[in-house]
Structures are given as structure tokens and as C-alpha cells.
Amino acid sequence: MSETGARPAAVEIGYTWRGLRDSAVFALIAILVTTSLAFRATDKGSFHQIPAVMSVVCGLWTVWLGGLVVRAAWRAARRLPFLTLDSDGVMLHSARVALPWSNVAEVRIVSRSPDGRTAKLIVFVPVDTDRAVAGLRGMPRRFARSGIKRVGGPIFVRPYALAMPFEEVLATARTLTTVPIRPAVDPRSGPPRSWFRHS
């Protein structure tokens, strides 16, 4: 991505070790679940089909997740960016997924708290989901498709995983694009208010 016109240059946001730690714990739990299912598949010398199938599925998912964690840790150790925002769009480096502003319908802030102040996820929602994954292959494509299905966008990050305050990330986005920034409340919470209203 490059700078164009009078807009700010690319803003590269690094990782926080807290975010990596939580991802690593999640990957470890996935490994333990996969191992447990594998043992159940051959319990007492007999072969059990359902646990065997589940262990294979969990194993593949664990490898995928582990690959993302390892890549993120490697990039963090080398002080490489986690997320880049520039005049062209947004790039999530850990997953190798990019989205131009022309294909971003909104930046969605998913919150758990009724007042909208505790952000759970920042989601870049595409205008055209097919175009968002069209040029992707392999792991990046799987990541993007999974994100679109689960949270509404191919690029999504937890604010605490970013080495930049949440408010600064939003301020940076506002200087680069006119794409609206909108709240989306967790179903377990009430409607948000306050600082989202001017977006």
C-alpha cells in the first residue's frame, strides 16, 4: 500500500505480547482437545469413528491456528507490523489479508458494554464479500472466509492486541477514509451510546 495525495502516510501498528499470549493459550487448549479426542478414538484398543473424525477436524483447525500464532510471534519478535492503515486500505499482516477502502462498507466496533466503551472487536466489513476473498488462496482465504462468516468481515482485531490505543486507531482511520465507524453491541448487552454518534 502507498501514500496518495495529501493523505497521511501508512500507519503501521505493532503487536502487544498480551494479545499473542492469549492466542497461544487458545492454541494450547486446541492441542489438548485434539490429543484427548485422539486417545478416545483408540480407547481400550477399539477404534471409535466419531472421536476419530472429530480429532482429525480439530487437528487440522489446530494446525491452521498454530500457523497464525507462530507467524504472529515471529513478526512481533522482529518488530514487524500487525496491522497497517493507509490511503489505499487496511492490511492484516498476520493473516496476509488486505482490504481496499473502496470495498469497506463500515468499520464495525463490537462492544460488550451497554455504553459502548469496552470494545471487543474492530471489524472491517466489506461491501462485496466475494471480491474480498477473490484474490486469496490457502490460509489467508480460509481466515477471511471464516471471519466473514463469524464476525462479518475478513479483517478483525481485538483492540488489546494492538500496540496503539483504541481511540488512536479510530482517529487514524478517520483521517484516511470517509467509511463510517459504527457500533455493534454484543447480544448480551444493551444499546451503545456516546462517542460513536459522531461517526
Image (cartoon, grey):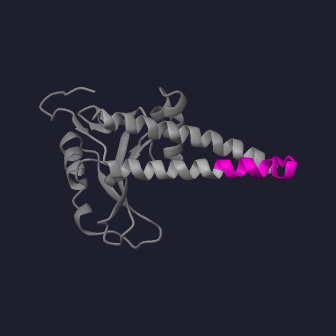
Nearer to us in this view, 179 or 139: 139
| Left or right side of 157 for 32 | right
Magenta stretch encompasses residue 163: no
Nearer to us in this view, 21 or 9: 21
Residue 73 position by quadrant = top left
Residue 15 placement (x, y as % from top left): 31, 43
Nearer to us in this view, 75 or 198: 75
Q: Residue at x 54, y 29 (%)?
A: 138
Query: Which residues make up the magenta segment?
Result: 34-49
Does the image show residue 141? yes
Residue 151 placement (x, y as % from top left): 47, 52
Magenta stretch encompasses residue 40: yes
From the image, give the main secondary structure of the stretch colored magenta: helix
Q: Residue at x 65, y 45 (%)?
A: 58
Q: In this view, does 158 lie above or below 4?
A: below
Q: In this view, does 8 lie above or below 171?
A: above
